[in-house]
Image (tube, rainbow, N blue to C red):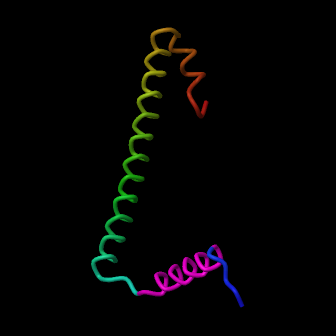
Amino acid sequence: MKVSKRQLRRIIKEERARLLSEQPISGEQAAQMQSDEEKRRMQSEADHIRSAMHDAALAADLEMEMKDVHTPEFIALWEPGF
């Protein structure tokens, strides 16, 4: 049976991928993966905090604008829970 160059390349690529996926990772690789995951988690938390601070700043700006433009009676009606 003849195997074309393209088929041979595909077979080699598949076998290489299979062998690499079966290899156990070293302790250094595991530590790096854990470190990378921790960095992603910390970045996600920082993004969440940054977003919450931005939302709070917008709410404070809106409240200040409301006090400058509207009467206290209107603001009392506008506040949530009324």
Q: Give whichever of 39, 29 is nearer the camera.
A: 29
Residue in front for this viewpoint, 41 or 19: 19
Quadrant of the image containing the C terminus: top right
Task: Give the residue furthest to the left.
Answer: 28
Image x and y of residue 56, in percent:
43, 34
Q: Main secondary structure of the magenta part?
A: helix
Q: Residue at x 55, y 22 (%)?
A: 76
Indicate whether residue 25 is drawn in magenta: no
Q: Tell which residue pokes out farthest to the bottom in this image.
A: 1
Residue 33 horizontal side relative to residue 28, left or right? right
Q: Is residue 16 magenta?
A: yes
The quarter of the picture where residue 29 lies is: bottom left
Residue nearer the viewer, 12 or 66 = 12
Q: Is residue 73 above or below residue 20?
A: above
Instruction: Name, please, the residue furthest toward the right.
Output: 1
Say above or below: 8 vs 37. below
Which residue lies at the image location 29% right of the left edge and 82% below the top edge? 27
- Quarter location, residue 80: top right
Quadrant of the image occupied by residue 35 = bottom left
Q: Which segment is the magenta one?
A: 6-23
Name the foreground residue: 5 vs 19: 5
Residue 81 in picture, x, y percent from top left: 59, 34
Residue at x 46% of width, y 14% of height: 67
Image location of residue 73, percent across then percent down: 55, 15
Q: Residue at x 44, y 40 (%)?
A: 51
Q: Quadrant of the N terminus?
A: bottom right
- From the top left corner, tell me how far across and down residue 77 is, in percent: 60, 22
Count the marks: how many?
Answer: 0
